[in-house]
Image: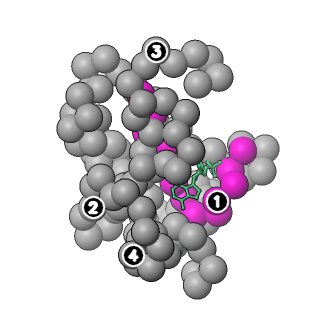
Amino acid sequence: MSDCIFCKIANKEVPSEIVYEDDRVIAFKDINPVAPVHILIIPKQHISDMTAVTEAEAGLIGDIHLAAVKIAKEKGIDQTGFRLVNNCKEDGGQVVMHLHYHLIGGRKLGVKI
Ligand code: AMP
Ligand code: ZN
């Protein structure tokens, strides 16, 4: 997707503060953090949202989950806890239409983050 900001970040065409990367997944700091740790974890391939994940791609969700735990350990929040959030489509509050999970932590989170 040539006009997708997260594809551009995954392709290093747009700068970001990358905190984790493997062959399928990349994670970078959210530009507008809501907590001391706020990382976005995305598949490198363009998938618009959670509903577009095919059975063949389902392993990517596990990859993202494992990446989240690695990052949480590295950031020292795996013991205190964190939240892994996916906003799906308009009513879910999704603004960037490239599947992403927010890893949020580093402070006590309320019901509305
Ligand atoms: P969502 O509402 O779930 O689509 O969240 C999109 C998130 O992407 C927001 O938290 C933004 O702050 C973040 N964001 C948008 N553009 C960038 C960017 N270029 N680099 C890092 N984070 C971004
Ligand atoms: Zn994309």
Residue 59 visible in the current orientation: no
Closer to viewer: mark 4 or mark 2:
4
Residue 33 shown left or right of residue 95 in the figure: left
Q: Residue 77's x, y, as percent?
A: 29, 26
Structural distance between the alpha carbons of marks 1 and 4: 17 Å
Query: Does the magenta segment cover residue 99?
Result: yes
Q: Are marks 1 and 4 in contact (CB under 8 Å)?
A: no
Label located before the other in sequence (3 or 4)? 4
Q: Is label 4 in a helix, a strand or a loop?
A: loop
Mark 1 highlights which residue?
Answer: 96
Q: Residues within 10 Å of mark 2 (few under 14, many from 20)?
A: some
Q: Is label 3 in a helix, a strand or a loop?
A: loop
Vertical position of residue 16 compared to residue 19: above or below = below
Label located before the other in sequence (4 or 2)? 4
Q: Which residues are magenta?
A: 93-105
Q: Is label 2 in a helix, a strand or a loop?
A: strand
Mark 2 highlights which residue?
Answer: 21
Residue 107 shown left or right of residue 49 in the figure: left
Q: Residues within 10 Å of mark 3 (few under 14, many from 20)?
A: few
Label located before the other in sequence (1 or 4)? 4
Structural distance between the alpha carbons of marks 3 and 2: 27 Å
Label located before the other in sequence (3 or 1)? 1
Residue plotted at (42% across, 62% down) = 16
Residue 111 visible in the current orientation: yes
Label located before the other in sequence (3 or 2)? 2
Mark 3 highlights which residue?
Answer: 108
